[in-house]
Image (cartoon, grey):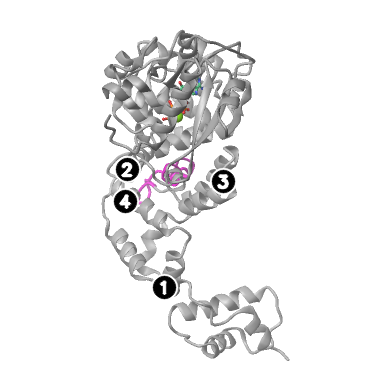
Amino acid sequence: MTEPFSTAKLIAAKEIVVALRHADHQAYFAGGCVRDLLLGVEPKDFDVATSATPNVVMVMFPKTFSVGAHFGVVLVCTPDRDGSEIATEVATFRHDGAYSDGRRPDAVRFSTDPREDVLRRDFTINGMLLDPMVFEETGDAAAATLDFVNGRNDLNAKILRAIGDPELRFNEDKLRTLRGVRFAARLGLEIEPLTMNAIRAAASEIGQVSSERIRDELTLMLTEGHARRAFELLDETGLLAQVLPEAVRMHGVEQPPQYHPEGDVWVHTMLLLEKLKPGVASTLAWGALLHDIGKPATFRPPDPKKPGDRIRFDGHVEVGVRMTEEILRRLRFSNEDTEQIIALVKNHMRFGDILQMRESTLKRFLRLPRFDEHLALHWMDASSAHGDLRLYEFARERYEETPVETTSPRLLVTGKDLIAAGYRPGPRFKAMLDAAEDAQLEGRATTTDQGMEIVKQRFGVPSA
Ligand code: ATP
Ligand code: MG
């Protein structure tokens, strides 16, 4: 068997299948990994589906965790050759009962019928099983696949289709609407018309899914490649209007053609999303999505009384920062991610001033946490508009040639020095320390004495 990817996870899952079969249970690879093996791409994980009940699975393997006892999912940990551990999800075949909360079944019934198990899965491309032994013998994923839902045909024809009655399936679990969009974008699939209609019909109820899950799905869409297509599909299905109505408002917001020949704010933002590579930092991806979110609210057409006036978005950064704060709070982002995404939105226009910045201002700019993300956002922003990369090149060169010791040097003047010189701690301290640091960053002060001298000149000698 020849795989184009690392095989440790595959071997771990296969050994679990072998052990289950030795004990007379049925066991297969299931879901996303089968789809990916058929496509010849590396699966993120190899999930196992079995007729053995969770209790049996927990007894059979020495190290297990019940991760979804209610749904019969057990995490089986097996040692890798290098001593690390591989965790494989083993799920008992099951039939899901009624759904009343729009997200999870009220109860599940375990089953010994693999066909029943695939019928509860979301999409035909995700509803296939694979016999790893046949795969090992033949090296042919197609020959090893058990396909009760016609998933192979759909995968070959590049069609995303819900298993069973689409309306029913999206009604059961509204998260499937977002998953459908995500898989269609990631794998370049057309959404089959009945599936599409059902997603549209269920879109208004996406609020039944927790904000965290919505956030995680959107983040995956932004970071798996194909973010543009994902957001266009979110828009077409009506999901975007539910989860991020602020983004829908970017449509039709005209921009001055001399800076933005590409078109309106929506088109510009889509061009940025198109540039997000798989595996991109999620903060950068959200920054790209939200950097101009303040534009629709601040749009001002040219003043007809002022010849040569252009469209303006005065204050769009400040408004954008406030909107971003609100959106990230709503989607329950961590404080750390929120801080970085807001910093990206807040600073994105500052590249325009970079040639005029005082040395100290430039150094403070270059030392923003994860400046590489600011740089990448500016590159995307400029390449998705006028295409002039001179400011980007300038910033990149300065960033690369300026070591951290230069942008964040050991401070010559600290609060202690001010106190020692006789200044009383108070609100002026920050301005004093900033003045000393500016002088240091600009090379006007290279010793503590010189730094203190500058403070004294600016703020007066301490009163006795
Ligand atoms: P990825 O490569 O992104 O992990 P995946 O297909 O493996 O994609 P998972 O979220 O890991 O997706 O889920 C594994 C499998 O479980 C899916 O392939 C699908 O068969 C099933 N599944 C997951 N979530 C749902 C859901 N909400 N409704 C129905 N079936 C689901
Ligand atoms: Mg998976």
What secondary structure is marked by label 3?
helix
Residue at far front of view: 22
The answer to the question of whether label 4 and label 3 lie on touching residues, with beta carbons closer than 8 A, is no
Could you tell me which residue is drawn at 71 percent across and 82 percent down?
424
Quick one: quadrant of the N terminus?
top left
Q: CA distance from mark 3 to mark 1?
A: 29 Å
- The percent position of residue 104, horizontal first and vertical second, equals 59, 20
Label 1 vs 2, first from the N-terminus: 2
What secondary structure is marked by label 2?
loop
Residue under pointer 2 = 275
What secondary structure is marked by label 4?
helix
- In the rendered image, residue 66 lying in the magenta stretch gets the answer no
Question: Which stretch appears magenta?
Answer: 287-311
Could you tell me which residue is drawn at 35 percent across and 49 percent down?
381
Residue under pointer 3 = 325
Q: CA distance from mark 2 to mark 3?
A: 24 Å
Residue under pointer 4 = 382
Residue under pointer 1 = 358
Amino acid under disc 1: Arg
Quick one: quadrant of the C terminus?
bottom right
